Amino acid sequence: MRMIRPRMIPLRTIPALVMPLRARFLRVMPLRAKLLRLMLLLTACLFATEAMAVELLKTVRICTPAWDDYTQPDGTGLYHELWQEIFAESGIHIEVVYAPFKRCENSVLKAPFKRYDAYPAGYEGRGGLNPIWHLGIDLLTVAYRKGALSRWVGEGQLENKPVAWLRGYDFGKHVLKVPVREYEVSQIEQGLEMVSVGRVDFVLDYADNIRKHVEQLDLGSKIEIAEDVIIGPKYYMIFAKSAKGQELAEVWDRGMMRLYEAGKLTEMYKRYNDLAY
């Protein structure tokens, strides 16, 4: 029988056979190490994000105009009470800054102005986060020059007429069902003065504000007031589009639900003669 001798591999060829295997091994190991490092980094980021969200929720920064009975600078008013009941009761410190409405809206919604977490009385679809529970319902009052109308009969009387309101309120877009010639004013006093001399035909605002300034300006003999005659949509606390804003909106909804179920929400609104609840 012929014996078959095993083929001997020369020693000089062994490195040539081993080196490709070693190269493959070295290529695979760094990839695995990189994947492991990436997983650890993502895990760390997740925990850091959660910790940051908890830290950020310690404070809510609200920008608002100063409105009688709602957001008075001395800290009284319906909205101040709501913020105390909802945010402060949840352990969140409240910081309030007073500014014109348009500036507040920009400071919450628009880069690079974003400085605050929320503003009150914004309409849905303005670019921020609106919660489920609304803050109020628009009920507008109309001021016009005495003798301009025999009496107020409806919104159709505004059609194609010059109509003024405060800058940023956007009643033409969100409330009115007829086209008008829009005039935005910085102060309601400016709009009422324009009505009194015939520069615009109508001013739209809320009843308390119009009554107050007509009296202060001594325009009662020149201006007629039709109170609460235009019903608009709901408006909301509007929160910034961010992880913190989302958390704050959820805190708001939970707080409003709690107040409603306890019967306290309706009581609070009734005390301020607000019919939203």
Image (cartoon, helix red, strand yellow):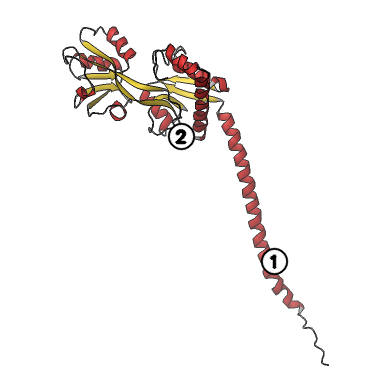
Measured as percent of width and height from the top left, residue 156 is found at: 21, 24
Asked whether, in this view, residue 92 is left or right of residue 161, the answer is right
Q: Which mark is residue 22?
A: 1
- Quarter that holds the C terminus: top left
Image height check: is 36 above or below 246? below
Is 105 located above or below residue 4 in the figure?
Answer: above
Residue 72 in sight from this viewpoint: no
**Residue 251 image offset from top left, x and y in percent:** 53, 27
Outermost residue toward the bottom in this view: 1
Q: Which mark is residue 113?
A: none
Amino acid type of the residue tagged 1 in the rendering: Arg
- Which residue is pictured at 49% across the width and 21% down the height? 260
User: Is residue 253 shown to the viewer in this render?
Assistant: yes
Q: Which residue is mark 2?
A: 241
Residue 213, horizontal then vertical, whole percent: 30, 11
Location of the N terminus (image quadrant): bottom right
Of residues 228 and 129, the one nearer the viewer is 228
Farthest right residue? 1
CB under 8 Å between discs 1 and 2: no
Give the image quarter of residue 71: top left
Tell which tag, 1 or 2, sits nearer the viewer: 2
Residue 220, picture quadrant: top left
Residue appearing at x 71%, y 71% in the figure:
18
Q: CA distance from mark 1 to mark 2?
A: 52 Å
**Mark 1 Cα-neighbour bin, 10 Å: few <14, some 14–19, many ≥20:** few
Q: Position of residue 36 (x, y in %)?
A: 65, 51
Residue, x 49% and y 29% (percent of image)? 249
Compare marks 1 and 2 and give the one earlier in the sequence.
Answer: 1
* Residue type highlighted by circle 2: Lys
In the picture shown, does residue 23 fall above or below 70? below
